[in-house]
Image: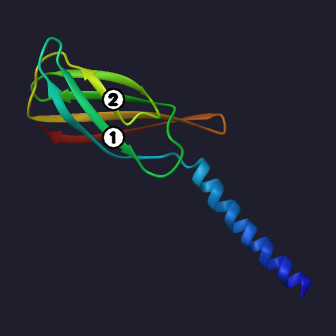
Amino acid sequence: MILQRNLIMGSIGLVMGIVVTNYLLRPACIHMAKVTAVSAGKPGYASVAWSYGRGMPPISVIIDLTTGSGASGSFTADGELFNAEIPLSEKFSGAYILTLTQTHRILGIARTTVQTFGGTI
């Protein structure tokens, strides 16, 4: 009886440990990124928003914005941010490509992932 109870409790503890470790050590992926607005002026700015899934947020995120018309811009954000204002080289409207490079540090090892999102404004 005691052996059976210890086996059950040990199994529950093992499963909980695996779930918690997986959550804490898994890097959060970016689920969505889009340009929400573009401001006029010199230089113009593009407001960009993104969201993370479950897991550990990145240390930093580099957002590169390129458009078919030649406008471009880049911004490095802290991993805890969810939006940024990117200065643009020129005005744009229409299609764009956002390239987000995120860096995670898991158990002291740096891991970099790159994701690309497209859209139209």
Residue at point 22% right, 35% down?
A: 35
The picture places residue 113, in percent across and down from the top left corner, at 44, 38
In the image, residue 53 above or below residue 109 = below
Q: Is residue 108 left or right of residue 99?
A: right
Quick one: SS at disc 1? strand
Classed neighbour count for the residue bearing mark 1: other residues with Cα under 10 Å, few (<14), some (14–19), many (≥20): some
Mark identifier at residue 63: 2
- The quadrant of the image that shows the N terminus is bottom right
Residue 4 in the image: above or below residue 85: below
Three-letter amino acid code of the residue under disc 1: Trp
x then y, percent, for residue 41: 12, 14
The quarter of the displayed image where residue 73 is located: top left
Say few, some or many: other residues with alpha carbon within 10 Å of mark 2 (under 14 / 14 to 19 / 20 or more). Answer: many
Which residue occupies 27% across, 23% down?
86
Residue 62 point in image, percent of width and height: 38, 28
Task: Name the residue: 52% across, 49% down.
Answer: 55
In the rendered view of the protein, which quadrant contains the C terminus? top left
What is the distance, in whole Å, between disc 2 and disc 1 at their CAs? 10 Å
Q: Amino acid at mark 2?
A: Ile
If you read the primary sequence from the N terminus, does the residue marked by circle 2 or circle 1 appear first? 1
**Snapshot quadrant of residue 84:** top left
Query: Residue tagged by mark 1?
Result: 50
Residue in the foreground of this view, choosing between 19 and 49: 49
